[in-house]
Image (spheres, grey):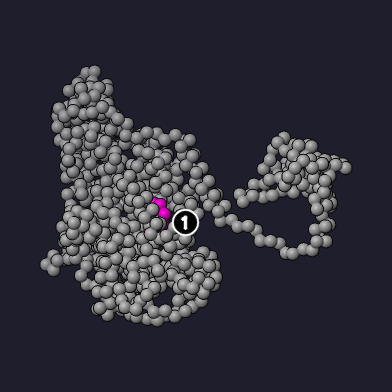
């Protein structure tokens, strides 16, 4: 059953691999939703620990290190600094953003493993696992790729298929191959320690079924695993990079990254205490329930859907077996966000990277937070497009939200000397508006408490629309001519709506909310104050109007779209390899080819053809017509006068009703572009190539 009135909240956001930058899929999946939830709780004066960090072990780190020519430690140091800075710039308000490479994490992970080991929880088994004979190394799941048994993706990993999302084991892959050498791995015996999920299944089932309030996508994935029957899962791996197994005679073995990574939430909490107080004393209240108050702390994990099984089954199973920890009360996992009609892919460089966004679109942190919340993949996969980003900014943030705040402030300076006017007698429209205003904070809060952040944002925008409609209906710019006292009441109410907007929008738009609060002179008001008609006192000065949002022009969006396609193209080129050498020929075969130097003396486009140019080439003894498929690479007028190599004895061929006699020799570059093959110095037309 869910915990309804906890004394405190432990809120975690997924520990991301420190093997690359943060992109918008990560943000929409868990980090922005988690930050919205935490900011809302803090505004309601709740006691909260907001915990996250980087996962700095596992095969993705070593793969990146190999690719960049760095050590694993250099890789995690590089990306931890970048990710941490990006989160801070976006306003993600962690209490601690820690690292799993810290000593406190190694100590905590080893302690929990050893506790389970001493309680005889683990099963010690010798099994056959894939081994790369070329690299002389056992292969962790992510070092093995092969064909997915579910969707036939030929590049599925040994633990998961990124195309269909299926969780796999290496032995399920068809045609497996090593990512280290490309060779087909062999099976070799090795000893590891397994968590007996099969024997723990009844406890896990009771735990899952007691949380019918969880999101359907989360429950559905959990129930699918339970229906198939849980199996023991290895909690150690044969690797060099990671946390050494705290058991004798285990050289070359480390803790499975999905055993120790979620423990990172616990060790990060200890790290937080150490940074605050110099000692980890006090971490227990966030993780270990008191005997007489087991439901004082509510644990909520924010993750993406690819981490559901680990946070809802494996980590809870570990905590159950250990026996001294609270279990997750909710795991509001989101689905995936796609990008411009395609799946976000770090390997294909098809992503909007946060650090680049912050550099190229400075002061637009809240625009990104807004758009990713409005399009959040809460119940199904969603889509980010730059055109939608532009439309939401220009039509909604500029045209509705920013427009209302600006009008209220400008009119106050114009008609009320820049001070909050006193409200007079209320008319029916005023009473109706104030009644609606009072109801909004509770509606928005209920949506946030139930992890419906898109709905909360809709209500916030409806409140801004209420403000715009109120001004449009009351028309203070006309009323001022006949009834200045009435204008005072109208603008008092408009400013009270603005003040409530500053409070209720803060979880989603923290930078904007701070600007509004500064304009209005709000000081310390929190969620319980929102919606009240006296948030601002009469006579309180209001600073001059400042635009909260600016329109984004077409050229800015076009640049971002082009950048995406350029990055994808460059990535594809990086993956290209030199074509293999063709089958052997004898010298006599080559000697049959009559290759000569020629000069292009005329060139023109071939009507009704996109590819062909009609060339006239001088080969010394005569001039010949050649049809060449190069018009997509060269303009006719630009190539006249070029010296080229020409295959003179190729049999004539008819194309587009014309005869082509011979062939111009071209070289194709990595990106598919063509270049003429030319002699290294001025050679007379007809000179032969031997």
| Residue 179 image offset from top left, x and y in percent | 50, 66
Residue 29, relative to residue 129: is it above or below? above
684 left or right of 179 in image: right
478 left or right of 587 in image: left
Which quarter of the picture shows residue 323? Answer: bottom left
What SS does tag 1 mark? helix
Label 1: few (<14), some (14–19) or many (≥20) C-alpha neighbours in 10 Å: few
Give the residue drawn at x 28%, y 42%: 510
Q: Nearer the viewer, residue 565 or 587?
A: 587
| Residue 458 image offset from top left, x and y in percent | 31, 44
Q: Nearer the viewer, residue 433 or 319?
A: 319
Which residue is labeled 1 in the image? 68
Which quarter of the picture shows residue 389? Answer: top left
Task: Examine the structure image and report whether residue 21 is included in the region drawn in magenta.
Answer: yes
Give the residue drawn at x 30%, y 30%: 546
Magenta-tinted stretch: 17-22
Q: Residue furthest top?
A: 481
């Amino acid at each position: 059953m869910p915990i309804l009135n906890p004394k405190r909240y432990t809120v975690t956001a997924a520990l991301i691999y420190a093997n690359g930058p943060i992109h918008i899929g990560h943000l929409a999946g868990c980090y922005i939703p988690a930050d919205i939830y935490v900011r809302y709780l803090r505004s309601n004066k709740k006691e909260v620990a907001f915990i996250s960090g980087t996962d700095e072990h596992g095969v993705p780190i070593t793969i990146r290190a190999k690719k960049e020519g760095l050590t694993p430690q250099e890789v995690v140091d590089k990306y931890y600094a970048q990710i941490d800075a990006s989160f801070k710039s976006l306003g993600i308000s962690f209490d601690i953003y820690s690292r799993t490479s810290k000593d406190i994490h190694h100590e905590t992970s080893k302690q929990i493993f050893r506790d389970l080991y001493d309680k005889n929880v683990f099963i010690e088994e010798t099994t056959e696992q894939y081994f790369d004979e070329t690299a002389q190394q056992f292969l962790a799941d992510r070092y093995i790729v092969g064909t997915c048994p579910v969707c036939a993706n030929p590049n599925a990993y040994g633990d998961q298929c990124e195309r269909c999302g299926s969780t796999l084991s290496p032995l399920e892959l068809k045609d497996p191959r090593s990512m280290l050498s490309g060779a087909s791995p062999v099976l070799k015996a090795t000893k590891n320690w397994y968590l007996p999920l099969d024997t723990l299944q009844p406890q896990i089932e009771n735990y899952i079924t007691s949380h019918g309030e969880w999101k359907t996508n989360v429950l559905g994935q959990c129930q699918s695993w339970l229906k198939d029957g849980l199996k023991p899962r290895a909690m150690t791996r044969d690797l060099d990079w990671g946390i050494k197994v705290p058991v004798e005679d285990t050289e070359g073995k480390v803790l499975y990254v999905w055993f120790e990574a979620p423990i990172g939430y616990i060790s990060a909490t200890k790290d937080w205490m150490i940074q605050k107080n110099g000692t980890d004393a006090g971490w227990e209240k966030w993780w270990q329930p008191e005997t007489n108050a087991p439901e004082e702390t509510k644990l909520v994990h924010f993750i993406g859907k690819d981490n559901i099984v680990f946070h809802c089954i494996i980590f809870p199973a570990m905590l159950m077996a250990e026996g001294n920890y609270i279990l997750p009360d909710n795991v509001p996992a989101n689905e995936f966000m796609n990008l411009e009609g395609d799946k976000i892919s770090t390997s294909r460089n098809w992503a909007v990277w946060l650090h680049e966004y912050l550099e190229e679109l400075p002061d637009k942190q809240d625009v990104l937070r807004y758009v990713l919340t409005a399009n959040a993949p809460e119940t199904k996969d969603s889509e980010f497009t730059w055109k939608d980003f532009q439309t939401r900014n220009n039509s909604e943030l500029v045209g509705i939200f920013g427009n209302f705040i600006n009008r209220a402030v400008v009119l106050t300076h114009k008609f009320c000397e820049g001070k909050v006017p006193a409200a007079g007698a209320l008319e029916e429209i005023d009473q109706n508006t104030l009644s609606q205003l009072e109801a909004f904070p509770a509606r928005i809060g209920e949506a946030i408490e139930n992890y419906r952040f898109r709905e909360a944002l809709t209500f916030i925008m409806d409140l801004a629309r209420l403000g715009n409609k109120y001004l449009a209906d009351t028309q203070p710019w006309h009323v001022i001519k006949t009834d200045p006292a009435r204008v005072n009441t109208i603008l008092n109410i408009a400013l009270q709506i603005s003040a409530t907007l500053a409070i209720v929008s803060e979880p989603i738009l923290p930078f904007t909310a701070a600007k509004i609060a500064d304009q209005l002179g709000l000081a310390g008001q929190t969620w319980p104050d929102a919606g009240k008609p006296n948030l601002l006192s009469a006579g309180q000065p209001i600073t001059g109007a400042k635009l909260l949002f600016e329109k984004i022009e077409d050229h800015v969006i076009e640049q971002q779209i082009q950048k995406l396609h350029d990055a994808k193209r460059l990535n594809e080129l990086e993956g290209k390899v030199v074509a293999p050498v063709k089958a052997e020929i004898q010298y006599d075969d080559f000697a049959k080819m009559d290759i000569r130097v020629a000069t292009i003396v005329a060139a023109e486009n071939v009507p009704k053809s996109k590819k062909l140019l009609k060339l006239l080439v001088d080969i010394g003894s005569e001039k010949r017509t050649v049809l060449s498929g190069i018009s997509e690479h060269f303009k006719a007028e630009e190539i006249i006068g070029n010296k080229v190599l020409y295959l003179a004895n190729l049999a004539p061929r008819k194309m587009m009703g014309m005869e082509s006699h011979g062939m111009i020799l071209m070289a194709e570059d990595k990106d598919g572009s063509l270049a003429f093959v030319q002699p290294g110095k001025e050679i007379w037309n007809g000179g032969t190539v031997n």
